Amino acid sequence: MAKERKEEKAPEELLVLHERWVDFAKRHIREIIIAAIAIVVVVAAWSGFTYYQQQKTEKAALLLVQGLMTQDQKQRENIYQQVIKKYGNTPAALEARLALFEEYYAQGKLSEATSELEKVASKAKGDLKYFSSLGLGYLKEEQKKYPEAEKLYEKAATAKIGLEKVAYWDLSRVAELQNKLKEAVKYYEKLVALKPEAEKLTFIQVKLERLSQKLEKID
């Protein structure tokens, strides 16, 4: 009997775990995107930087490190802005924008944080663009701008770079927040098609069952 109760409780525990994962992802947007920037830097290095580009990149990186090591918040933000102004087309400038994003986000300045991340996305190429879209989606969702968040998650979901599972989780959640139950079902079904791990599959099945029950009441 105790075993049966434990099994019944498991889906609820999975629901809580999923929400914790979402909170973690929101707090680590910068780390997620910096990982993508690191790939861009390596590719650029192998592509053959000119001597001038190398010098510019190195100076930008040194100034960025100076900013990262500065204790005073205003001075730190000022240095990040200098990196962006002087070395706008370097990877360090992208990281400086992400650092500014992190500063503003920590201060609860969501509008300014969003603006910085949007600028990163506008400069981004390849995979980085889709990682940026995912990060922007989290910010829009936090501001309860659900339709905008949904569009950004859709970009990440269709990119075919390994973000599909994460993005479809996000799409299903934001669809539910908008009470778009049929769309939420569609996204959860796409997740099932991606063959998730057993525990996640259990979570999805619970969600689909609950959504189906809600839809039956509406119909």
Image (cartoon, rainbow, N blue to C red):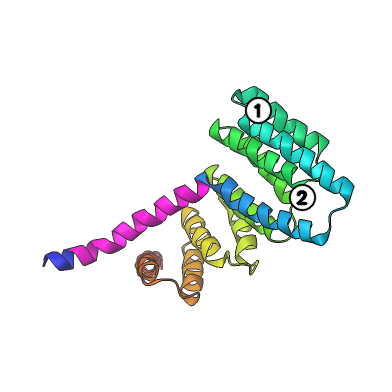
Principal secondary structure, stretch drawn in magenta: helix
The picture places residue 121, in percent across and down from the top left corner, at: 71, 50
At horizontal 84% and vertical 58% (from top left) the residue drawn is 48
At horizontal 63% and vertical 57% (from top left) the residue drawn is 151
Q: Residues within 10 Å of mark 1 (few under 14, many from 20)?
A: many
Q: Is residue 78 above or below residue 18?
A: above
Please indicate whether residue 16 sits to the left or right of residue 153 in the image: left
Image mark for residue 123: 2
At horizontal 50% and vertical 74% (from top left) the residue drawn is 194
- Element carrying mark 2: helix
Label 1 or label 2, whichever lies nearer to me, is: 1
At horizontal 57% and vertical 45% (from top left) the residue drawn is 139
- Residue 209 magenta-highlighted: no
The picture places residue 45, in percent across and down from the top left corner, at: 77, 56
C-alpha separation, residue under disc 1 versus residue under disc 2: 23 Å
The picture places residue 5, in percent across and down from the top left corner, at: 17, 64
Task: Kindly identify the amino acid type of the residue bearing the numbered disc 1.
Answer: Arg
Ranked by sequence position, the earlier of labels 1 and 2 is 1
Image mark for residue 179: none
Task: Kindly identify the amino acid type of the residue bearing the numbered disc 2.
Answer: Lys
**Residue 148 seen in render:** no
Q: Quadrant of the C terminus?
A: bottom left
Pick the residue in front: 71 or 156: 71
Q: In this picture, which residue range is highlighted in magenta?
A: 6-26
| Number of disc labels | 2
**Which residue is denoted by mark 1 in the rendering?**
76
Q: Quadrant of the N terminus?
A: bottom left
- Residue 12 magenta-highlighted: yes
Pick the residue in front: 39 or 12: 39
The picture places residue 192, in percent across and down from the top left corner, at: 46, 74
Q: Is residue 72 above or below residue 86?
A: above
Q: Is residue 171 above or below residue 144?
A: below
